[in-house]
Image (spheres, rainbow, N blue to C red):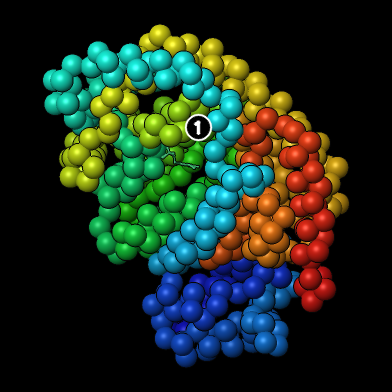
Amino acid sequence: MTRYEQLANTMAAQIRSGSLAVGARMPSLRQVIAQHGVSQSTVFRAYYLLEEWGLIRAQERSGYYVARGAAVARNHAQSQPRTPAAPAKVDISDLVFSVLEAAKHPGIVPLGSAFPSPLLFPLQRLAKSLGQSARFVSPWNSVADLPPGNETLRSQIALRYLRMGIAQPLDEIVVTNGALEALNLCLMAVTRPGDVVAIESPGFYAALQAIERLDLRAVEIPVDPRTGLDLDALAHALQTYPVRACWLMTNFQNPTGVTLAVEKKKALVELLAQHDVPLIEDDVYGELHFQADYPLPARAFDNRGMVMHCSSFSKTLAPGYRVGWVAAGKFADKVQKLKLMTTLSSSIPVQAGIADYLQHGGYDRHLHKLRAALLAQRGDMEAAIRRWMPDGVKWARPEGGYFVWLEFADPIDAMELHRLAIEQRISVAPGPMFSAARAFENCVRLNFGHPWSAKIDDALRVLGELVRRTVTPARR
Ligand SMILES: Cc1ncc(COP(=O)(O)O)c(C=O)c1O
């Protein structure tokens, strides 16, 4: 097969799997060249071929679009296995940075934010713990708390695993600067440049950025907002490509909010074990469950040390403190060394402060209140969506966390929506941020982690109007 035929096949699979939605603009020449490392003429020939196959159509002076009727329409209830597209390089950082930058201005309604409101955190009580431990921390701790990290903190973390029924060895827990460092260190521990990593689509943009930075290639596995990761597609990817690692969320996935059923989590661990592929499990929202118990992570079903379970206190207690961890299984030693080589250690007084809070500050009481607030805000958000968004909008109710993923019935341009919304001082997280192929153009992620107010409700009203304006006649 020639290079352009290969490229056309890859893109055809993306269209058929729905990761490039009907009506979506095809990636630009520059994006395809950067992602696939091919020449301009290869892209042109691939696009001509896709056009011949009836999968895309050219629109004058505007580019190529996925043709109506080209793909199996994306459907939440879809059950047939979808074939993941071939692994590709990732080039997403500029898009992500521009969206995050635009959303930073004070006074903006933070519907696109990744954080809940600081008003929901016990900052005073935490400051007391921090002050106390800073005053009493022994100078010797600057050595004792080097990686794997403060022992009291790690014991408190291990206790929380125990409450889930997981006997987590203390020496496998490495304290990090937030979950993001944990995830990045894990990825570094198990890959080398050029390796293939399986990630979710849509999925957390930091996974895409890490893959881009480490010069890896991503194979994107579809995530259904109701049922979660497509395990058949993952099995297919594992058989077809030399996948070195998998980076996934099994609880309250970002951006869809979906949680995998227990049986699926077990099957996932088994499937990866069959292929000897480590799982980097991102579980930063696990504590924010609306049902009675913490939904067990995939880590609970692993007895081979192949799951690296990453989390943090950023979403539940102390966003700015940057304290996270990984229970790294058999990779703990490697992760610990990488931590030493990159950032040496996490802040010692801050580790001690969080440890003190976990021991004496009433973390469980706080979590109880936080979950209740988020649950109430989910109700407010759903009511506002029903009130203000166009008919036919779909979302799957998240059972934890603080994100809702909207899919509009008419094709819209989420990037244009983001731009118009910023002009109105409202941020949203547009769908294309969450995939290497910049798909999900008619999706946005909204944050309900802020106490409900008339201002937020009004922002939803404005957003509804902008969504209607963003459906362009050419793409109806
Ligand atoms: C899914 C997911 N994982 C990891 C992180 C990063 O967590 P931390 O702030 O602890 O580094 C975030 C933050 O937005 C996230 O949404």
Between residue 129 and residue 368, name the one nearer to us. Answer: 129
Q: Is residue 237 left or right of residue 77?
A: left
Q: Is residue 448 above or below residue 8?
A: above
Looking at this rendering, what residue extends furthest in the top direction? Answer: 360
Q: Is residue 170 left or right of residue 217?
A: left
Q: Residues within 10 Å of mark 1 (few under 14, many from 20)?
A: many
Q: Residue at x 22, y 46 (%)?
A: 342
Q: Is residue 331 left or right of residue 392?
A: left
Q: Position of residue 126 (x, y in %)?
A: 43, 19
Which quadrant does the N terminus fall into?
Answer: bottom left
Respond yes or no on whether mark 1 lies under 8 Å from ligand 1. Answer: yes
Between residue 183 and residue 121, name the one nearer to us. Answer: 121
Q: Position of residue 69 (x, y in %)?
A: 74, 71
Name the residue that disc number 1 marks.
315
Residue 357 visible in this rendered orientation of the protein:
no
Q: Position of residue 373 (x, y in %)?
A: 66, 24
Amino acid tagged 1: Lys
- Secondary structure beneath dot 1 equals loop
Q: Position of residue 376 (x, y in %)?
A: 71, 26
Q: Quadrant of residue 446?
A: top right
